[in-house]
Image (tube, rainbow, N blue to C red):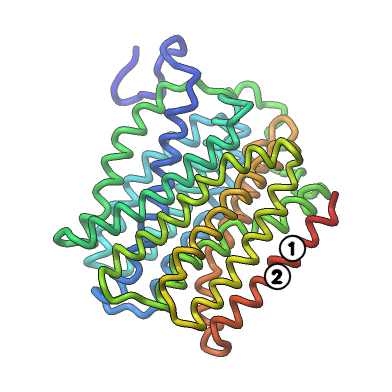
Amino acid sequence: MVTAVRPASTPARSRVADWRPVALIMFGVGWGANQFGSLLGLYTHRLHLGEGSVQAMFGIYALGLVPGLALGGPASDRYGRRRLALPFAACSALVTMVLMAGAAEPALLYAGRFLAGIVTGAVLAAGTAWVKELSPAAGTRLTALAVSAGFGAGPLTAALVAQWSPDPLVTAYLPHLVIMAIAVPLAFRVIETRPAAANAGGGRRGFRLAGVRRPGFRRWVLPVATWVFAAPVCAFTLLPAQVPVHHLPTAYAGLMTALTLAAGMAAQPVARRLETRHPRLLARVGMAGTGAGLLLAALMVQLGQPVLNAAVAILLGASYGLLLTYSLGEVARMAEPGELAGLTAMAYALVYAGMFAPVIMTELGRLVSIPILLTAAAGLALASLALVSRSD
């Protein structure tokens, strides 16, 4: 018998092989993960927190991703996609409630951001594999689109609500609760693509993640995935703080976040064409755009011209879209049966390590000017481009 208490027991014949509900929960989890980003300035002023503190709150999210990805990905390969993705997606709403309580007790913001990392890691690892198995031909691009849309819409909406609503550090989070209340029940109707019973013989191999040790992962994924977020998060967290605007600053921060990630979505048609010609063209074009965007960011800070932030956001955002699609696609191509979600999780771990970039630059900025740091980062990005170009 099916009960409301256990929706996961929905009869198999009533389930559907539809990737869209899974993409919707990934959109919602991405929304919840990034809605905090556009509120950094508001937390700084309302709660009298230092810039280093709010950047640390932003970055601690990446620490939560490590256990979320490392455990969620291989566990999904072993026990099934639904068993991991759906409970953690439901927990995303609970994490948002913790962040709402952080307006009264700032220590909860650290806990909420850490938990957001765990939840996001588990859902992205399991959900990416789930969508890929539901839609083999377009799963990688669909995942990139869903995640990018959530990452962009979340901070923009949170910023607009916070800019003009009462009690902004609470009301800014309400839209996410509505989204998850709609998305999670819909995803319970989607079929399981990797039943646990089918994995009894391959579970141990999945937890070992032998694919990480392959030369292809080190040559073609590692040098690229670490740049996916390292550069674009600087566009919407570091740069608005370094070159601030004085009119509607919260809405401005949300707009820069949305613009960065919207550019990533807009780059998908280009990604599709480049991938058809050669998958590593995505990496080359994306890394070249990252280097150029970081140089433009250095110029923006040096000149003190916030108007350049939009150009930086578009350039780094488009590069983000190419590099994310490339990283997920490369992993899907090299993954053996039973390790898709686990290897995807490792790629995401590299991707999200880049979220520490604003924290590192803020601290190093006490010793070296930010334009010099951004120029050095551009040099490293171009060195990675050279490395990938030699790897064919």
- Image mark for residue 175: none
Q: Nearer the viewer, residue 282 or 171?
A: 282
> Which residue is found at the position 28% from the left and 63% from the top?
102
Distance from label 2 to label 1 (Cα)?
6 Å
Q: Are marks 2 and 1 in contact (CB under 8 Å)?
A: yes
> Which residue is found at the position 27% from the left and 79% from the top?
48
Q: Quadrant of residue 388?
A: bottom right
Q: Nearer the viewer, residue 143 or 290?
A: 290
Q: Nearer the viewer, residue 196 or 280?
A: 280
The answer to whether 201 is drawn above or below residue 286 in the figure is above
Q: Is residue 92 visible?
A: yes
Task: Give the number of callouts.
Answer: 2
The answer to whether 264 is drawn above or below residue 102 in the figure is above
Determine whether, in the image, residue 245 is placed left or right of residue 215: left
Determine whether, in the image, residue 175 is placed left or right of residue 80: left
> Which residue is found at the position 48% from the left and 82% from the top?
303
- Image mark for residue 380: 2
Q: Secondary structure at mark 2?
A: helix
Q: Which residue is mark 1?
A: 384
- Which amino acid type is marked by label 2? Leu
Q: Position of residue 179 (x, y in %)?
A: 31, 39
Q: Is residue 52 visible?
A: no
